Amino acid sequence: MSANIIDGKAFAAKLCIRVGEHVANLKAKHNITPGLAVIIIGHDPASQVYVRNKAKQTLEVGMNSFKYELDEDVSEADLLKLIDELNVRDDVHGILVQMPVPKHINATNIINALNPAKDVDMFHPLNAGKLMTGQVGPVSCTPLGCLMMLRDVHSSLEGKNAVVIGRSNLVGKPMAQLLLQQNCTVTMAHSRTIDLPPVVRLADIVIAAVGRAKMVKADWIKRGATVIDVGINRIDAPEKGEGKTRLVGDVDFDAVKEIAAYITPVPGGVGPMTIACLLANTVTTTCLINGLTPPKDLTA
Ligand code: GUN
Protein backbone atom coordinates (compact mmCIF):
# COMPACT_ATOMS: atom_id res chain seq x y z
CA MET A 1 0.00 0.00 0.00
CA SER A 2 1.24 3.45 -0.85
CA ALA A 3 2.19 5.83 1.99
CA ASN A 4 0.08 8.71 3.23
CA ILE A 5 1.58 11.88 1.83
CA ILE A 6 2.08 14.53 4.51
CA ASP A 7 0.87 17.76 2.97
CA GLY A 8 3.36 20.32 4.28
CA LYS A 9 1.80 23.07 2.18
CA ALA A 10 -1.64 22.66 3.76
CA PHE A 11 -0.10 22.28 7.22
CA ALA A 12 1.93 25.47 6.72
CA ALA A 13 -1.12 27.37 5.50
CA LYS A 14 -2.99 26.46 8.72
CA LEU A 15 0.01 27.50 10.84
CA CYS A 16 0.22 30.83 8.99
CA ILE A 17 -3.44 31.49 9.81
CA ARG A 18 -2.66 31.01 13.53
CA VAL A 19 0.42 33.23 13.19
CA GLY A 20 -1.72 35.93 11.52
CA GLU A 21 -4.22 35.77 14.39
CA HIS A 22 -1.47 36.25 16.97
CA VAL A 23 0.00 39.14 14.97
CA ALA A 24 -3.44 40.81 14.88
CA ASN A 25 -3.76 40.26 18.62
CA LEU A 26 -0.32 41.78 19.34
CA LYS A 27 -1.29 44.81 17.29
CA ALA A 28 -4.74 45.26 18.82
CA LYS A 29 -3.93 44.54 22.46
CA HIS A 30 -0.32 45.69 22.77
CA ASN A 31 0.23 48.04 19.83
CA ILE A 32 3.16 45.89 18.70
CA THR A 33 3.75 44.87 15.08
CA PRO A 34 6.29 42.04 14.86
CA GLY A 35 9.11 42.89 12.45
CA LEU A 36 11.40 40.43 10.67
CA ALA A 37 14.67 41.59 9.07
CA VAL A 38 16.18 39.33 6.42
CA ILE A 39 19.71 39.87 5.12
CA ILE A 40 20.84 38.28 1.87
CA ILE A 41 24.33 38.60 0.47
CA GLY A 42 25.06 38.06 -3.21
CA HIS A 43 22.91 36.75 -6.03
CA ASP A 44 22.54 33.01 -5.52
CA PRO A 45 19.26 32.30 -7.39
CA ALA A 46 17.99 29.68 -4.89
CA SER A 47 18.64 31.99 -1.92
CA GLN A 48 16.95 34.86 -3.78
CA VAL A 49 13.80 32.74 -4.21
CA TYR A 50 13.76 31.70 -0.52
CA VAL A 51 14.23 35.26 0.66
CA ARG A 52 11.56 36.62 -1.69
CA ASN A 53 9.10 34.03 -0.37
CA LYS A 54 10.01 34.78 3.23
CA ALA A 55 9.46 38.53 2.73
CA LYS A 56 6.15 37.98 0.90
CA GLN A 57 4.72 35.70 3.55
CA THR A 58 5.95 37.95 6.37
CA LEU A 59 3.77 40.73 4.94
CA GLU A 60 0.85 38.35 4.35
CA VAL A 61 0.59 37.49 8.06
CA GLY A 62 0.59 41.20 8.92
CA MET A 63 4.19 41.59 10.11
CA ASN A 64 6.67 44.21 9.00
CA SER A 65 9.31 42.90 6.62
CA PHE A 66 12.74 44.52 6.30
CA LYS A 67 14.87 43.14 3.49
CA TYR A 68 18.59 43.94 3.09
CA GLU A 69 20.21 42.85 -0.16
CA LEU A 70 23.97 43.24 0.14
CA ASP A 71 26.58 42.98 -2.60
CA GLU A 72 28.53 39.72 -2.91
CA ASP A 73 31.73 41.59 -1.91
CA VAL A 74 30.31 43.36 1.16
CA SER A 75 32.88 43.39 3.95
CA GLU A 76 32.37 41.42 7.13
CA ALA A 77 32.73 44.69 9.06
CA ASP A 78 29.86 46.30 7.14
CA LEU A 79 27.66 43.25 7.65
CA LEU A 80 28.43 43.25 11.39
CA LYS A 81 27.58 46.97 11.50
CA LEU A 82 24.16 46.30 9.97
CA ILE A 83 23.54 43.46 12.45
CA ASP A 84 24.51 45.76 15.34
CA GLU A 85 21.92 48.29 14.16
CA LEU A 86 19.16 45.70 13.77
CA ASN A 87 20.05 44.15 17.15
CA VAL A 88 18.91 47.30 18.95
CA ARG A 89 16.04 48.47 16.76
CA ASP A 90 12.70 48.41 18.58
CA ASP A 91 10.72 47.58 15.44
CA VAL A 92 12.84 44.50 14.60
CA HIS A 93 12.03 41.35 16.57
CA GLY A 94 13.65 38.76 14.35
CA ILE A 95 16.87 38.78 12.30
CA LEU A 96 17.73 36.19 9.68
CA VAL A 97 20.98 36.11 7.73
CA GLN A 98 20.40 33.85 4.73
CA MET A 99 23.01 31.07 4.63
CA PRO A 100 25.39 30.29 3.08
CA VAL A 101 27.31 33.57 3.23
CA PRO A 102 30.20 34.22 0.77
CA LYS A 103 33.52 32.58 1.61
CA HIS A 104 35.27 35.80 2.68
CA ILE A 105 32.76 36.21 5.52
CA ASN A 106 33.16 34.13 8.65
CA ALA A 107 29.69 32.71 9.34
CA THR A 108 30.55 32.02 12.99
CA ASN A 109 31.38 35.70 13.57
CA ILE A 110 28.03 36.64 12.03
CA ILE A 111 26.03 34.16 14.10
CA ASN A 112 27.79 35.18 17.31
CA ALA A 113 27.01 38.85 16.58
CA LEU A 114 23.23 38.28 16.44
CA ASN A 115 21.21 39.45 19.39
CA PRO A 116 20.16 36.01 20.74
CA ALA A 117 16.71 37.41 21.59
CA LYS A 118 16.14 38.14 17.88
CA ASP A 119 17.79 35.01 16.51
CA VAL A 120 14.76 33.40 14.82
CA ASP A 121 16.93 30.69 13.24
CA MET A 122 18.25 29.62 16.63
CA PHE A 123 21.81 29.74 15.29
CA HIS A 124 23.38 31.60 18.21
CA PRO A 125 25.24 29.29 20.64
CA LEU A 126 23.13 30.61 23.52
CA ASN A 127 19.96 29.44 21.76
CA ALA A 128 21.52 26.13 20.70
CA GLY A 129 22.40 25.63 24.39
CA LYS A 130 18.84 26.51 25.44
CA LEU A 131 17.46 23.88 23.10
CA MET A 132 19.90 21.32 24.45
CA THR A 133 18.86 22.04 28.03
CA GLY A 134 15.13 22.26 27.26
CA GLN A 135 14.66 25.99 27.98
CA VAL A 136 12.00 28.20 26.39
CA GLY A 137 13.06 29.95 23.20
CA PRO A 138 12.74 29.81 19.46
CA VAL A 139 13.49 26.45 17.86
CA SER A 140 15.25 26.18 14.46
CA CYS A 141 12.63 26.57 11.76
CA THR A 142 13.17 23.43 9.70
CA PRO A 143 13.41 20.99 12.64
CA LEU A 144 10.41 22.65 14.28
CA GLY A 145 8.40 22.18 11.08
CA CYS A 146 9.45 18.52 10.86
CA LEU A 147 8.47 17.91 14.48
CA MET A 148 5.07 19.59 14.04
CA MET A 149 4.27 17.28 11.13
CA LEU A 150 5.50 14.22 13.05
CA ARG A 151 3.37 15.18 16.06
CA ASP A 152 0.39 15.51 13.76
CA VAL A 153 0.64 11.97 12.43
CA HIS A 154 1.80 10.25 15.63
CA SER A 155 -0.08 10.74 18.89
CA SER A 156 3.17 9.91 20.72
CA LEU A 157 6.76 9.65 19.56
CA GLU A 158 7.88 8.11 22.84
CA GLY A 159 10.25 5.17 22.50
CA LYS A 160 10.38 5.31 18.71
CA ASN A 161 13.66 4.74 16.90
CA ALA A 162 14.54 7.91 15.01
CA VAL A 163 17.46 8.13 12.61
CA VAL A 164 18.58 11.60 11.57
CA ILE A 165 20.79 11.53 8.48
CA GLY A 166 22.95 14.66 8.44
CA ARG A 167 24.58 16.51 11.34
CA SER A 168 24.40 20.16 10.33
CA ASN A 169 23.94 22.89 12.93
CA LEU A 170 20.96 24.09 10.86
CA VAL A 171 18.96 20.85 10.77
CA GLY A 172 20.54 17.59 11.95
CA LYS A 173 21.74 18.58 15.42
CA PRO A 174 18.65 20.55 16.53
CA MET A 175 16.38 17.89 15.01
CA ALA A 176 18.08 15.22 17.12
CA GLN A 177 17.61 17.36 20.25
CA LEU A 178 13.91 17.86 19.54
CA LEU A 179 13.38 14.13 18.99
CA LEU A 180 15.22 13.39 22.25
CA GLN A 181 12.86 15.78 24.04
CA GLN A 182 10.02 13.63 22.64
CA ASN A 183 11.66 10.57 24.24
CA CYS A 184 12.69 9.00 20.94
CA THR A 185 15.79 6.82 20.77
CA VAL A 186 17.88 8.92 18.42
CA THR A 187 20.69 7.90 16.10
CA MET A 188 22.61 10.57 14.21
CA ALA A 189 24.02 9.23 10.97
CA HIS A 190 26.29 11.21 8.68
CA SER A 191 28.76 11.08 5.82
CA ARG A 192 31.25 8.99 7.84
CA THR A 193 28.69 6.46 9.05
CA ILE A 194 29.84 3.02 7.98
CA ASP A 195 27.14 1.03 6.17
CA LEU A 196 24.24 3.45 6.44
CA PRO A 197 21.36 1.30 5.05
CA PRO A 198 21.14 -1.15 8.02
CA VAL A 199 21.22 1.82 10.41
CA VAL A 200 18.31 3.49 8.61
CA ARG A 201 16.42 0.17 8.38
CA LEU A 202 16.01 0.20 12.20
CA ALA A 203 14.17 3.52 12.12
CA ASP A 204 10.49 4.11 12.83
CA ILE A 205 11.21 7.72 11.87
CA VAL A 206 13.73 8.81 9.25
CA ILE A 207 14.81 12.43 8.85
CA ALA A 208 16.84 12.82 5.65
CA ALA A 209 18.90 16.01 5.69
CA VAL A 210 22.04 15.29 3.70
CA GLY A 211 21.63 17.34 0.53
CA ARG A 212 22.12 14.43 -1.92
CA ALA A 213 19.40 13.83 -4.48
CA LYS A 214 17.37 10.60 -3.95
CA MET A 215 20.08 9.06 -1.76
CA VAL A 216 17.72 7.22 0.59
CA LYS A 217 16.48 4.11 -1.20
CA ALA A 218 13.38 1.95 -0.65
CA ASP A 219 15.37 -1.02 0.65
CA TRP A 220 16.79 1.20 3.44
CA ILE A 221 13.32 1.76 4.88
CA LYS A 222 11.47 -0.36 7.42
CA ARG A 223 7.90 -1.10 6.27
CA GLY A 224 5.52 1.35 7.95
CA ALA A 225 8.19 3.95 8.83
CA THR A 226 7.60 7.70 8.68
CA VAL A 227 9.99 9.49 6.32
CA ILE A 228 10.62 13.23 6.50
CA ASP A 229 12.62 14.58 3.56
CA VAL A 230 14.45 17.83 4.26
CA GLY A 231 16.50 17.78 1.04
CA ILE A 232 15.99 20.29 -1.75
CA ASN A 233 18.14 19.28 -4.72
CA ARG A 234 17.85 20.58 -8.26
CA ILE A 235 18.42 17.92 -10.92
CA ASP A 236 18.25 17.85 -14.70
CA ALA A 237 14.80 16.99 -16.04
CA PRO A 238 15.18 16.20 -19.75
CA GLU A 239 11.61 14.82 -19.71
CA LYS A 240 10.43 18.44 -19.21
CA GLY A 241 12.47 19.66 -22.15
CA GLU A 242 16.06 20.51 -22.95
CA GLY A 243 17.91 22.35 -20.19
CA LYS A 244 14.97 22.01 -17.76
CA THR A 245 15.44 21.09 -14.10
CA ARG A 246 13.24 19.97 -11.22
CA LEU A 247 13.45 19.76 -7.44
CA VAL A 248 13.85 16.44 -5.66
CA GLY A 249 14.54 15.52 -2.06
CA ASP A 250 17.17 13.32 -0.42
CA VAL A 251 14.71 10.41 -0.60
CA ASP A 252 13.87 8.29 -3.65
CA PHE A 253 10.24 9.32 -3.22
CA ASP A 254 8.49 7.14 -5.82
CA ALA A 255 10.05 3.92 -4.50
CA VAL A 256 10.06 4.80 -0.78
CA LYS A 257 6.38 5.78 -0.75
CA GLU A 258 5.53 2.13 -1.47
CA ILE A 259 7.24 1.05 1.78
CA ALA A 260 6.70 3.92 4.24
CA ALA A 261 3.44 4.64 6.08
CA TYR A 262 3.92 8.43 5.93
CA ILE A 263 6.20 10.53 3.76
CA THR A 264 6.75 14.21 2.97
CA PRO A 265 7.02 15.17 -0.72
CA VAL A 266 9.53 17.58 -2.29
CA PRO A 267 8.39 20.19 -3.11
CA GLY A 268 5.40 20.73 -0.83
CA GLY A 269 6.62 19.02 2.35
CA VAL A 270 9.20 20.47 4.72
CA GLY A 271 9.91 23.62 2.64
CA PRO A 272 6.62 25.47 3.26
CA MET A 273 6.77 24.52 6.94
CA THR A 274 10.21 26.12 7.32
CA ILE A 275 8.86 29.52 6.33
CA ALA A 276 5.71 29.14 8.45
CA CYS A 277 7.89 28.23 11.45
CA LEU A 278 10.11 31.25 10.82
CA LEU A 279 7.02 33.45 11.11
CA ALA A 280 5.89 31.53 14.19
CA ASN A 281 9.34 32.05 15.74
CA THR A 282 9.11 35.77 15.05
CA VAL A 283 5.87 35.91 17.05
CA THR A 284 7.64 33.98 19.84
CA THR A 285 10.62 36.37 19.93
CA THR A 286 8.30 39.41 19.75
CA CYS A 287 6.44 38.14 22.81
CA LEU A 288 9.59 37.30 24.77
CA ILE A 289 11.24 40.65 23.96
CA ASN A 290 8.11 42.41 25.25
CA GLY A 291 7.73 40.33 28.41
CA LEU A 292 4.66 38.48 27.09
CA THR A 293 4.05 34.74 27.25
CA PRO A 294 4.51 33.25 23.75
CA PRO A 295 1.49 31.42 22.31
CA LYS A 296 1.57 27.66 22.83
CA ASP A 297 -0.06 26.75 19.53
CA LEU A 298 2.97 27.89 17.52
CA THR A 299 5.30 25.19 18.80
CA ALA A 300 5.21 21.42 18.58
N1 GUN B 1 19.61 28.73 4.21
C1 GUN B 1 18.88 27.59 3.99
N2 GUN B 1 17.98 27.40 4.96
C2 GUN B 1 18.13 28.43 5.83
C3 GUN B 1 17.47 28.75 7.06
O1 GUN B 1 16.56 28.08 7.56
N3 GUN B 1 17.93 29.89 7.66
C4 GUN B 1 18.95 30.64 7.14
N4 GUN B 1 19.33 31.71 7.83
N5 GUN B 1 19.57 30.34 6.01
C5 GUN B 1 19.16 29.25 5.36
Image (cartoon, rainbow, N blue to C red):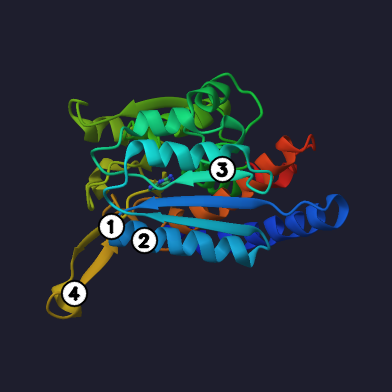
Residue 137 x/y as whole percent: 63, 32
Rendered-image quadrant of the C terminus:
top right
Residue 153 x/y as whole percent: 56, 49
**Local crowd size for mark 2, using a 10 Å CA cut-off: few (<14), some (14–19), many (≥20):** some
The disc at residue 193 is none
Residue 239 x/y as whole percent: 16, 77
Q: Secondary structure at mark 2?
A: helix
4 and 2 marks in contact (CB < 8 Å): no
User: Of tags 2 and 3, which is closer to the observer?
Assistant: 3
Q: Secondary structure at mark 3?
A: helix
Circle nearer the N terminus (4, 1): 1
1 and 2 marks in contact (CB < 8 Å): yes
Residue type for callout 3: Leu
User: Of tags 4 and 1, which is closer to the observer?
Assistant: 1
Residue type for callout 4: Lys
What is the number of callouts on the image? 4
The disc at residue 48 is 2
The disc at residue 44 is 1
Residue that carries the numbered disc 4 in the rendered image: 244
Say which of 73 and 112 sits in front. Answer: 73
Decide if ligand 1 comes within 8 Å of the CB at mark 1. Answer: no
Say which of 102 and 156 sits in front. Answer: 102
3 and 4 marks in contact (CB < 8 Å): no
Residue 95 x/y as whole percent: 53, 44
